[in-house]
Amino acid sequence: MARKDTILKNFLNHDLLESKYELDKTDLPTTVREALDSDKPIVKAIALIVEGLDGTAQVTDSVLRNQVTQFLNEAL
C-alpha cells in the first residue's frame, strides 16, 4: 500500500466521518485513486488534499485550497 493510501485510510477511519457524514466504514475506498472517483464529496475532497500534498507533483497550499474549494462549490 502506498504512503498516500495509508494517509487517506487514516483520515477516512476518523469517527467524525462516520457520525457526522453517516459514512459506512466498510464502503469507503482503500486507495486515493478510488477515493477520487467517489460520489461522496467529503471523501473526494479528502482524496484531493492527500493527492495534492503527497502526490508525485506537489502543489502549493493556495493552489490546493482553490482546487478543493472549487470542487466543493461544484459538488454542492
Image: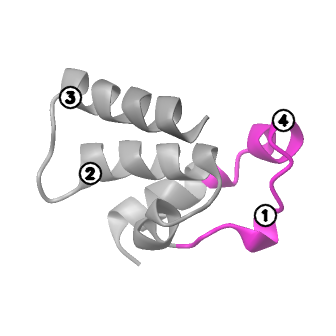
Secondary structure at numbered mark 2: helix
Quarter of the picture containing the N terminus is: bottom left
Q: Which residue is mark 3?
A: 63
Residue 25, disc: 1
Q: State the image coordinates of residue 33 (x, y, percent, origin top left).
A: 40, 71
Q: What residue is rendered at 16% in x and 29% in y?
A: 60
Q: Which residue is mark 2?
A: 54
Say if the magenta span includes residue 17. Answer: yes
Q: What residue is rendered at 50% in x and 45% in y?
A: 46
Q: Residues within 10 Å of mark 2 (few under 14, many from 20)?
A: some
* Residue segment shown in magenta: 12-30
- Tell me which label, 3 or 2, sits earlier in the chain: 2
- Tell me which label, 1 or 2, sits earlier in the chain: 1
Q: Is residue 68 left or right of residue 18?
A: left
Rendering quarter of residue 67:
top left
Q: State the image coordinates of residue 31 (x, y, percent, origin top left).
A: 47, 72
Point out the frontmost of discs 3 and 1: 3
**Between marks 3 and 2, how big is the CA–CA gap?**
14 Å
